[in-house]
Amino acid sequence: MPKWAMVIDLDKCTGCGACIAACKLENNIAIVAPAEAQNGRVMFWLDIISSYEGEYPAVKVNRIPKPCFHCDDPPCIKVCPVGATYKNEEGLVGQIYHRCIGCRYCMAACPYTSKVFNWEKPRWLDDTYSCFNPDVSLRMVGVVEKCSFCAHRLIKIKENAAQEKRAIRDGEYIPACMENCPADAIYFGDIDNKESVVHNLAHNFRAYRIMEDLGVEPKVYYLSKKF
Amino acid sequence: MEITRRDFIKLLGGISSTIALNGCTLDDVFEIPEKFINRIKSGPGIEKWKNTICGLCPGGCGIRVRLIDDIPVYVKGNPTYPVNQGGMCPLGLNALHHLYHPDRIKGPIKRIGNPGSNKWEAISWDETLKFIADNLVKLRNEGKSHQVAFLGYEERGLMHQHIKRFLRSYGSPNYFQFSPNQNDTIPYLLVQGNSKVPSYDFLNAKLILSFGYNFLEGGYSPIYYTKLYSHHRETQTIYIQIEPRMSLTGSNANKWIPIRPGTYGALALGIAYVLIREELYNKEFVKKYTFGFDDWTDFNGIKHLGFKNLVLGNYYPERVTEITGIPSSTILEIARDFGNTQPSIAIGGNGAIDNTNGTFSMMAIHSLNALIGNFEKNGGIFSIDDPSFSKLPEIYEDLIAKNGNKQERIDKSQDEKFFLSTFSIESFTNNILSDKPYPLSMLFIYNGNPLFESLNHSEVTKALQKIPLIISFDSIRNETSEYAHLILPDHTFLETWDEVSNVPSVGFTHVGIQQPVIDPLYDTKQVGDVLINLAKRIGGMVAESFPFEKYEDFLKNSLKGIYESGKGAITSEGVKGLWLEYLHQRGWHIGRYNSFEEFWDQLLENGGWWNPIKKEKTLDKFFSTTSGKFEFYSTRLKNQIENLVEKSRGPKFSQNMELILNKLNITARGDSIFLPHHEPVPYNQDLPLHLVTFNVLTNPSGRAAHLPLMQEMFGYMVRQYWDSWIEINTKTASELGISDNSWVWVESSTSSIKVRAKLSPAISPNVVAIPFGLGHTSYGRYARNHGINPYSIMRNTYDCINGRSALEGTKVKISKAV
Amino acid sequence: MRKYIKFIISIILILLFTFMAIPFAEDKIVQPINFNHKVHLENAGLNCTDCHVNVEKNARAIIPSIEICKNCHSENPISNSPNEKDLIKYIVENKEIPWNQIYRVPDHVYFSHRRHVAIGEQNCSKCHGDMADKTTPVTHQEIPITMNNCLDCHRQQKVTNDCLACHR
């Protein structure tokens, strides 16, 4: 059974934001009205956090793209009263919108604030069929949503592989953010496969995970010389 | 770098609930034709991919459009296209939002109310084209063909030639382009003798010294440079970025060095001082291939000052520190790094060129490359070959056309300014308003938005009101086209045929094909086809100059030349640079196609053609100056200025010279005028802070403000959505009692605006920065009434040599808004 | 009195929900042509995939377009059936037949015919019933397309029950 993981090379990442846009478009994420957005209700499954380090003029900016970390021991699933969020055998943390009751416990439990809530009915699209990516359903008001590692792509890739009676190749299943990253800073694959790029990078001396001391075992690794 | 949960929680915070809803709800964000919705609902769901070139900015990235049952649903980068190699910027990904935009103009329309009154009436193509052709014929018959002007944006290649062809055969010298990159090659023209944008071999360079050039976020092709940057993180290339506000490029550079705006030239010369003093420059190159380095004597026996002595005498580190605000130790350090880490490249742009002294600053920056002899070699500056397109059909000019073409350009300044510029918005508007040298009868506007992007906003407005007939080709009405009388909507780039070749500064010859991925959604026509149609209606030699029925045929014809040359290869997997070179050396024909049809089909399938192998050039061919060398002492500039002096026919040469120099805002005297030097910017010294603007990747030049996602992502770095902000240094702000996210007034000598403050340690304390791109009053429902346009408070000043707007030439004061 | 009102309201509500839960009233759906599957399968000797061409290749099987009808039928009738006359009208006008789609999974479910038929080797009749018996067009779901029915079958066949295998 593969275990999907992501590696983000912060030394290569420029912070251009292409991953955010690719993610929003791939997953039909609602564009939030201006006032709502300013009130912190903007919906990015993948966000970039910036922080400054040092004093002028010796300032450094850290920009970290932050998807859902698909933790191996996810705190969000423990608090979900209805089992709408769960971890599957391949390590993907799923969010089943039709089961979600919108209690937002999982949002509070997530140490990385990776989940977003649909405060408003996504007005911009009448129904799924008029949105852009027909492979992803549209969420309704009052449910929590989050990065899925583009799991809808995996369904099709599995199907293709099954038809051709073969295993999924390394690099065949990639999320939209990685696909469009102009700096080639995102890597994705099966971390249990010792041949995979992701496995090797995750064991690189530059690799680390954010807030590892929490013990939630996130499956998004960062590479940076700064550590 | 310690990240805590607090950092994450900060992301969730909103600013306040006091913001009024800007009257924008997001109902019907997009307009997708009913038939598409039905097809998507019940079609077989068959997936196809088509390659084309992105048209949202002039960067020329290859894109791959996903079609489900022939309906575009998603766009990604084309991994085999060499410019972007699969990478995309946030803007390019929005291609479909552009296609399905609800405010697209659905057919030709005619304005029936006042500008901005939103009263338009649909008309038929035939009626419109007949009306325009009749007017064009009438003007020609009256001998006023030169009173027709065409204002383009950044079209290059075939489209550029096509428009030129139309105006040449019709008889008007007035084809202009008004874009942020216009006239930026003039400094190169002065020192190198040609106005081609040089290509930089970033790939092999070891150090890149950038003077204000934000190439990861703006410039010619940000994604091309992002790819190179990411490669450089493996090869340990050093990036040094000099700019007052840390841009995306600055934040990714190894070193960010804040500088006082308008003093880039002085810093470059300060670096030159160290290079010369410490003998870090390439003596052999300087001796062989440059002119004006040492003092020299001309034919008349007059002694002239050389670059070396100018620099040694004036730009010693202490003085440069005083001008630029950069400590002399830093100057020494940069200069030594630059001289010792070979090959290195010095590039300039944005702030360095967007000021009243831009030409001289860029000359100074470019002379650093000459000092280290950085031309036509690995890791240096080179020029690439043009693609071998077939020769275009001949342009025929009848008598009327010949007469018209001989007329003076309508943007020619009436007071000697901007003598080298290819277009100046300042003199263009002034001349229209004063009817000098002649009135303008008809104006075509293609793609540009001069009203939004100019500093002389109110004059442009008046000029637009004065022109009797304005025809725009916009897909979405913008500030400028609100003043048009007719709008003939163009296809979007996803519905049209075109080519995007040799994007400036990209390091190899390439041609990308823009092909329709979908039939036009609305009753629109391609501009190339409209011009052919008009030419046919005018008839005579104008029609003869257009031997093809469609623009597409012109395109196909041009590409025959590339097929016949047998060079290069169609972009595809496995055809990488080294492999191509190997085949080339063996003398193998790389193409795997037996006929042009086959070549064409493969071209459309793969999206483009490229040839990374460039002809070896000798350096004397590289420099096309009169001396055949790199000219520190620009003879061209000297000749041009002396020409102006002679033409002004005053009593005494020296007095006239003084007059002209004053008009051109040049304070230097003697030989230094023609040498790279620091020209102080005439700032309003009463105001304390410099105002600089910057462009963000999500909305270059405000041209993506119609896209809702780009509006939402406008300030994702500072968490400001759909709105502008002003960046203020944390210390400056605390002195002024301004806190993060509070409202401030920004006041210049001309006017003031209110905007939200964002505090940052990554900006000089004496500088504030506002992003450009918002503050639209038109341009569709998502652009209107969001944020502010910083140009509205900026002084109307220009570089008097090349006519570029001085975007960093304004000082302001800020105060807390209550 | 209050108790009664509450009771009545809840009864009404329950009744309302019950009605809503009943699938579309079957006989209200009228197909544009009285299509006879039996004739096509038995007499003409066709297979399902001859007309529903995408079943093994694609996620969607689709209702055949008029082009597929034209493979056999033309303006000259090949039978005496009055239904064929109806069809010929559409052929002459070159219009698509406005069939009413009966089987549809909700938007948030990924259902692939290829996955079930070509890879999983399931028989069409498993969900659609035996069409060889049908002399009238389809007006209701033979086996209701519900998550319970999906899961029952998945359990029986011992294939994945992971939410993310279908939910999207």
Image (cartoon, helix red, strand yellow):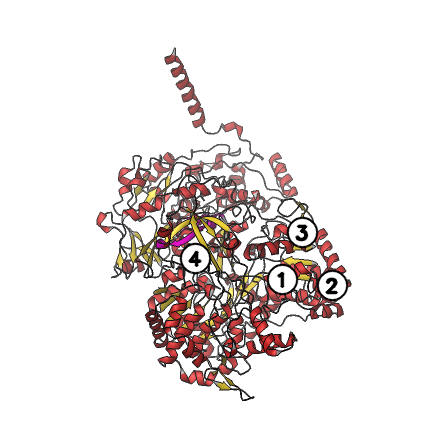
Q: Is residue B374 visible?
A: no
Which residue corresponds to mark 4?
B688
Question: Mark 2, residues whose alpha carbon is within 10 Å: few (<14), some, or many (≥20)?
Answer: many
The Cα–Cα distance between marks 3 and 4, rounded to whole angstroms, is 44 Å
Which residue is at the far right?
B141
| Amino acid bearing label 4 | Pro
**Pointer 1 and pointer 4 on the same chain:** yes
In percent of the image, x 61 and y 47: which residue is there? B116
Name the residue tied to disc 2: B144
Asked which quadrant contains residue B421, the reply is bottom right
Say whether disc 3 or disc 4 marks the residue closer to the N-terminus.
Answer: 3
- Report the residue marked by disc 3: B485
Work out whether disc 2 and disc 1 sit on a shared chain.
Answer: yes
Pointer 3 with pointer 4, Cβ within 8 A: no
| Disc nearer the start of the sequence (1/3) | 1
Badge 1 amino acid: Phe
Q: Mark 3 and mark 4, same subunit?
A: yes
Q: Position of residue B250 (x, y in %)?
A: 38, 62
The image quadrant that residue B284 belongs to is: bottom left
Q: Nearer the viewer, mark 2 or mark 1?
A: 1
Identify which residue, C153 or B257, lies in the foreground: B257
Q: Amino acid at mark 3?
A: His
**Cα gap from disc 4 to disc 2, whole angstroms:** 50 Å
Q: Which mark is residue B304?
A: none
State yes or no: residue B711 in magenta: yes
Task: Please say if the residues under marks 3 and 2 sit with CB atoms less than 8 Å apart.
Answer: no
Residue C1, position as x, y percentages in the image: 39, 10
Whole-number angstrom distance, CA of label 1 to CA of label 4: 32 Å
